Image (cartoon, coloured by chain):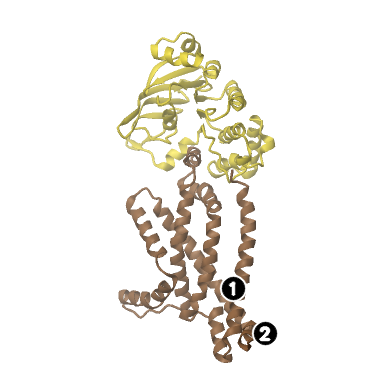
Amino acid sequence: MSDVPSIRIAGIHKSFGPLEVLRGVSFDVHRGSVVSVIGASGSGKSTLLRCVNYLEAPNAGEIYIDGEPLGTRVDARGQSRPRSLGEINTMRRELGVVFQQFNLWPHMTVLGNVIEAPIRVRKVSRKEAVEYGEECLRRVKLLDKADEYPARLSGGQQQRAAIARALAMRPKAMLFDEATSSLDPELTDEVLGVMRELASDGTTMIVVTHEMNFAHEVSDRVIFLHQGLIEEEGSAANLFGAPKSERLRQFLSKYRK
Amino acid sequence: MSDTLKQSLDLSMFWEYRAILLQGLIFNALVFLCSASVALSVGLGAALLRVNRFWPMRWIGTLHVEVFRNAPDYIMLVWVHFVLPLLIGLLIRRRVEFHPFVSAVIALGLVYSGYFAEAFRAGIQAIPQGNLDAARAFGMSERMILWRITLPQVVRRMLPEALNLFISMFKATTIVSLIAVPDLMYNVSMVIQQEMRPLPLYTGAALTYFLIIFALSSGVRHFSERWRRKIMA
């Protein structure tokens, strides 16, 4: 494995007005590994994920994708400059994002959703996009719904379609932002099943989640955020088996009831 | 039944002049198509100003909407045809005159751009932020997002209102005869001057407008609803 992490999150700060949501968060995600981020609501998990692909620009700190800074670049004179929106767009397409609310585009069919970004952004041919798009839909077991509009799918199916849409861009890593939080329990499993398969296929993933069992099972590393800082981090076994901080113990106890 | 009433219901004279009246109707259609294009494009521009991040842009958009939405069609028509050329003439120090057709298109286009701007704005603001987040996350440019994600949804959302606006707009094309655009009403007046029999001709014109607008709007409504239903949850 190379030394350069797939994603490096370095000293991210983010404030909304006077509210400091992230107060210096750093960690690395190595290729093929799964990092889960857990923490109470308001701990900054979702904001952190939105900072990773610059949907929210961090106030300080930087994100590196394969060693390349996302928000800045070094110019000919060796000075670091903020990237233009166009350059950020080029960088962020390397990260596939799956949102809590699915965010499928309602005016396109499932397949239309899946092939849109590859055709428009990656500029692959329609034929190629459809072929790979269908393969992605097969991976999430939704190929039979390719021609349906999102409004006619269940929440779980919509989320699986959203996962296929993200995979179709052949991202270097996948970011999951509470992908199952707006699903009924019986629909949660089908989505977690797909995510589990992706993890075992060696997909690099950052997973923000409230599903502790899932995090325990698939994560190589778990990060516990508290009030915008990493309170504790470590392997899934250590973090769930022997939590060191009192806060993490309290947090986990709520899920064990 | 009185003779006058009988006369007014006898449409044979209207039929007799069908060729020249049809020509007029074609002018109505032309004025409608051109001013609808102006209204849609200027309206979209004003709506994009209205939702702009920078307040001076928003302010300009609001001014546009308020000015044109509150201007009566007829006043705008007369103003654009008679006053606007004078003002432009003063500015460029040359005599300027607008062809009545051009004045008609500018006036109706501007008045209705105010209404369309509001319809577009409401549609744009109704799109969930998450839809745009997803597009941005895939590295789509703002322009691409507007054309591929925002507008196709906006058009579907605003369709019922847009349809009503188009109908009002088509009706409004009948006032262009006042500045001598040779539309149906204008030609009707010409024939009336010849024949001195206004009642059957006005009745014929009223019926013609009613039938055209009724047929078009019910047809369009039927098809657009089916298309809209497919995506609306």
Within the image, what quadrant is residue A191 found in?
A: top right
Foreground of the two, A65 or A57: A57
Residue B31 visible from this viewpoint: yes
Q: Colour of chain A?
A: yellow
Upstream in the sequence, badge 2 or badge 1? 2
Say how many tags the image has: 2
Residue A218 rendering spot, x and y as whole percentages: 55, 18
Q: Quick one: label 1, few (<14), some, or many (20+) residues within 10 Å? A: some
Q: Chain of mark 1?
A: B
Q: Chain of mark 2?
A: B
Q: Which residue is mark 1?
A: B209
Residue depicted at 51% across the width and 17% down the height: A220
The amino acid marked with disc number 1 is Tyr
Residue B194 rendering spot, x and y as whole percentages: 57, 91
Q: Which residue is mark 2?
A: B12
- Chain ID for brown: B
Callout 2: SS? helix
Residue depicted at 63% across the width and 71% down the height: B211
The amino acid marked with disc number 2 is Ser
Left or right of A133 in this view: A172: left
Callout 1: SS? helix
